[in-house]
Image: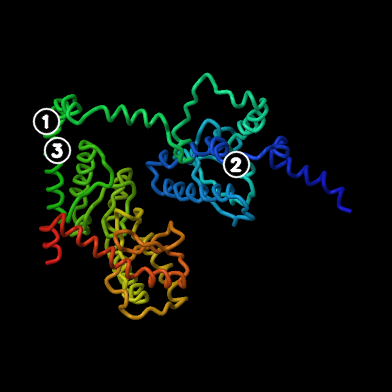
Amino acid sequence: MFCHLRPVRRLCLEKIFPHWFLSSRTLSGAEAVNALRPFYFAVHPDFFGQHPREREVNENSLKRLSVYLENLQKPGFRSLKPTQLTFYVRETEQNSSEGQEPFSTSGFRAVKFTLHTRDLLSTVLYILNSCSLSVEHIQSLNTNVHSQPLKEAKRMSDRPIKWDKSYYYFTGFKDPHEDLEQVSRMETTLTSWLDNNGKSAVKKLKNSLPLRKELDRLKDDLSHQLQLSDIRWQRSWGIAHRCSQLHSLGRLAQQNLETLKNAKGCTIIFTDRSGMSAVGHVMLGTMDVHHHWTKLFERLPSYFDLRRRLMLLEDQISYLLGGIQVVYIEELQPVLTLEEYYSLLDVFYHRLLKNRIPFHPRSLRGLQMILNSDRYAPSLHELGHFNIPSLCDPANLQWFILTKAQQARDNMKRKEETCSRQFPDLWALDTA
């Protein structure tokens, strides 16, 4: 009855995919990764070093994409839940043609799409088309790989193939060239390396001493003048770059000393963006002009008020979770501003209020948890603290914490014993 609809259906598919797709074979996992190489080059997080937020978005999306591709290759899978992904795509030779969505001044644009495909080939095509990347290389991959006789396919190529490092990064395969490089590096002993580089190191250190002294002097003068707790750098800039940043802050202090004194008792961190960090440090974006820094120092009283509200919110969450302490560990969590962290806590707190979890008061006292936005299931860290997703299901959260509470205490005790053995003097001072 509906046979006349088949040509229409095929016509619709041809509008979405190339004509060779309808009669194509199935891609293997390695071939899919190879076909996605232009995409990986366009979104690789290493190319977004100056843009931490976009870098983090791409890292998280790549993890979810990897899980989706792995599930497609599992035998006997029936269907996958639609997965929405967001990528920041940088401008490359393949996606710089006319007629596409314009790039920002930073050289990248945001692309959002939802994966609901059922095989690797259609998934690869959908990703490339969504990012306006070419799919011609997939046609050659699809028609040439098995077009040769089986005997020729088994024959080894005369020219060795050297894959790009991104291929090994995303497939997990071992790079044989890295093994050779590692062997060659191991042949160089510490003694021989020191002999070869010792004189150069001493010369560089001697040349840098005046600049190092200048850096220490500028840091001490500004810390004393503004009554700061400390001055730090989030990234490993060179000494000359750090001195330049301190000179800029010093000139601003000469112009607006009273305004900068709002930071009394704070730690100033030179980083990629301005604001206040989740732990209350004043963040000065190195790419911002003095006007932006001045506005930040003027807003510090309101930041201090938000910081007090944040600490109260942490106490309220702790009360609802049986006394477990909510902490923010800079070394183990992404860098968040005070506003971002407060929003994360607020979402989690209202979920707890909506779904009251019956924890006995103070039953979890002594335990710690950190709140994350990039996780999907709770976990227990080897140091003893819980990693809790902000959107975790309250019922699952209760079960997980109660079943892992004793293990968490054991991990924390083991950490304390290790610290006391390795640093007895510091540990005695800290517990005094």
Mark 1 or mark 3: name the one nearer the start of the chain.
1
Mark 1 or mark 2: name the one nearer the start of the chain.
2
Mark 2 or mark 3: name the one nearer the start of the chain.
2
* Residue where numbered disc 2 is placed: 124
Answer above or below: position of 178 versus 389.
above
In this rendering, the count of numbered labels is: 3
Few, some or many C-alpha atoms within 10 Å of disc 1 (few <14, some 14-19, many ≥20)? few
Answer above or below: position of 127 versus 397.
above
Provide residue 334's location: percent of width, then percent of height.
Answer: 36, 53
The amino acid type of the residue labelled 2 equals Val
The amino acid type of the residue labelled 3 equals Arg
Provide residue 348's location: percent of width, then percent of height.
Answer: 42, 68
Give yes or no for contact between labels 1 and 3 (Cβ–Cβ under 8 Å): no
Few, some or many C-alpha atoms within 10 Å of disc 3 (few <14, some 14-19, many ≥20)? some
- Is 47 left or right of 19, judged from the image as shown? left
The Cα–Cα distance between marks 2 and 3, rounded to whole angstroms, is 52 Å
Q: Residue at x 63, y 52 (%)?
A: 76
Q: Secondary structure at mark 2?
A: helix
Nearer the observer, 399 or 39? 399
* Residue where numbered disc 3 is placed: 212
Q: Secondary structure at mark 3?
A: helix
Q: Residue at x 43, y 42 (%)?
A: 45
- Is 248 left or right of 127, judged from the image as shown? left
The numbered disc on residue 206 is: 1
